[in-house]
Amino acid sequence: MTVETRAPEADSAKRRQVLDGARRVFLADGFDGASMNDIARVAGVSKGTLYVYFNSKEELFEALIREDRKQQAERIVFPADDGDPRLALASFGRQLIALMTQPELIAQVRIVIAATAKFPSLGRVFYESGPRYGEIKLAERLEVWRAQGLLQFTDGRLAARQFIDLCKSGVFHGCLFGVAAATPEAIAESVDAAVEVFVRAYGAAAPA
């Protein structure tokens, strides 16, 4: 097999082309069912070009996970801090669950779960670039509110993880197992309840 030389000026576009092709194949065939031959064909590149960018199917899937999670993370924006954690938490929760319940992400989660027993690194990459990243991002904002005296807790990362789990309650797992749809109404109901429980647990006590 002849390995093609990477053209620096076209590197980013070509890599994107490979990732887009790989995404279509993985979503259609799963991790085990996908082959590098199929990915090269769907991406419209030679197999040699494919191996210039990625040494294995596992490495390619890991790169795809990181890329997809990065794009989704960039779409979550906290509103301007107006001193009311409730509003910002509700906005964050709605954005997060709307992204987490997109059909492509649900399909990718299923693929990762199925493949992780054989390829533990896939689960680790997904966790670190997805759930762990969101947890850290939220914890940073929670720490600001704690410093302002608006919330009280001892562990920001734990509090962030608990809020995200509350937001996911019912909606995410319903989508994951194909028994419910994540309608805007269902997401709003779940997130609003999560905000209420979270603020009751961690809201700062009113001054005497």
Image: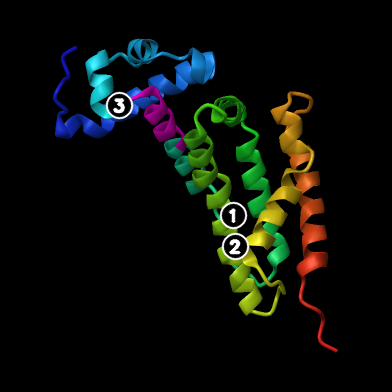
Residue 55 circle label: 3
Q: Which class describes the residues within 10 Å of circle 3: few (<14), some (14-19), or many (20+)?
A: few
- The image quadrant where one finds the N terminus is top left
The residue that mark 2 highlights is 139
Relative placement, left or right, of 62 versus 161 is: left
Q: Are marks 3 and 2 in contact (CB under 8 Å)?
A: no
Identify which residue is drawn at 81% across, 45% down: 189
Q: Earlier in the sequence, mark 1 or mark 3?
A: 3
Which numbered disc, 3 or 2, marks the residue closer to the eye?
3
Question: The residue tagged with tag 1: helix, strand or loop?
Answer: helix
- What's the amino acid at mark 2? Ala
Identify which residue is drawn at 20% across, 30% down: 10
Q: Are marks 1 and 2 in contact (CB under 8 Å)?
A: yes
- What's the amino acid at mark 1? Glu
Residues in magenta?
56-65
The residue that mark 1 highlights is 135
